[in-house]
Amino acid sequence: MGSKFAVFICASLLVAFANAHYHPKFSYTGPHVGPGKWGSLSPDYSQCDGKNQSPINIEKKNIVRSSKSEYLTRNYKPANATLINVGYKIELRLEGDAGSLLVDGKNYSLKHMHWHSPSEHTIDGNRYPAELHVVHHSEDGDAAVVSILFQFGDPDPFLDQIKDHLDQLAKETCDADEEAQIPLGVLRTKQIRRTTKKYFRYHGSLTLPPCTQNVTWIILGKVRELSKEQLAALKAPLPEEYKQNSRPTQPLNGRTVELLKCD
Ligand SMILES: *[C@@H]1O[C@H](CO)[C@@H](O)[C@H](O)[C@H]1NC(C)=O
Ligand SMILES: *[C@@H]1O[C@H](CO)[C@@H](O)[C@H](O)[C@H]1NC(C)=O
């Protein structure tokens, strides 16, 4: 009895220490560490109070139709991937050279992808059940994120590829643990780079602390489908307080959202 108690205390202290060391705790609800407080939780998070934050509501009547006709060029390569329960999101990290995305003549390397539920971006106020963020970094440290919105429907083929691993992640995750990781081997990214005829583009930030700005956002115009079972599998490994991990939409503050079409 006594030793069980000691083990419990020890695990709690380790978690508390890990959180304090790596990042102050933030959450999606509540008055203390919820989204309205992110900017004051740490000097490292001050950009969360910035003027160019994400996500946003995309209002179709206010978008600027770009005269440019720019295909989204994604040269992704086969790469080994690891599925990770970060605690507040499920992430797929790619190792080595996983290829790149070309935006406005600048190259961004594919680094990782993660899911939010419900969606963070909204279109004319409509929120979708899920949103996938495919994150790329340039050599000079800027980020470009490709966002794919999901509505309920047929299973998503990409999530089908990792379904068993998500179930395994849910089993391996206990509440007082570090990041649980599952190596996936070489991942097929065909469904992720499927061509798109229309997308929205604007300048924003990461939607998680430290909310780093100067992120180029590319939101695909085509809403894809996933099944309710797939969404449940994505949420299962996450602790109760992060099963909904969607930051509220942020003021546009005069930014423009461009619509790009390629035919
Ligand atoms: C994936 O990892 C395996 C084992 O480490 C390695 O042999 C293989 O070359 C890697 N594949 C790619 C595409 O990086
Ligand atoms: C964003 O980029 C602009 C110019 O590209 C620069 O002036 C500004 O300082 C950058 N902001 C941040 C937060 O990095």
Image (cartoon, helix red, strand yellow):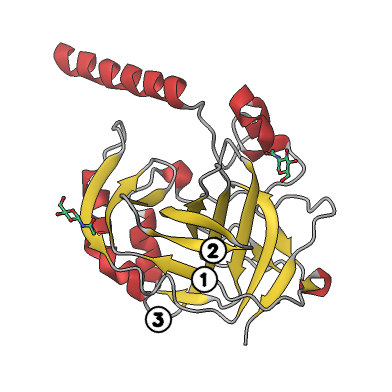
Residue at image mark 2: 102
Compared with 100, 64 (above or below) is below
For badge 1, the amino acid type reads Thr
- Three-letter amino acid code of the residue under disc 3: Asp
* Dot placed on the residue nearer the N-terminal end, 1 or 3: 1
In this orientation, does residue 37 appear? no
Asked if labels 2 and 1 touch by Cβ distance under 8 angstroms, the answer is yes
Q: Position of residue 192 (x, y in %)?
A: 42, 70
Residues at marks 1 and 2, CA–CA distance in whole angstroms: 5 Å
User: Spatial distance from mark 2 to mark 3, Cα to Cα?
Assistant: 30 Å
Q: Secondary structure at mark 3?
A: loop
* Lower sequence index among marks 2 and 3: 2
Mark 3 sits on what residue?
154
Residue 105: quarter of image: bottom right
Against 235, residue 70 (above or below) is below
Name the residue at 59% across, 41% down. 29
SS label for mark 1:
strand
**Residue 62 location in percent, x, y?**
83, 69
Single out the residue that lies furthest toward the bottom: 263
Q: Quadrant of residue 161?
A: bottom left
Residue drawn at (29%, 64%) of the image = 78
Q: Tell which of 183 and 74 is nearer to you.
A: 74
From the image, which quarter does the C terminus lie in?
bottom right
Helix, strand or loop status at disc 2:
strand
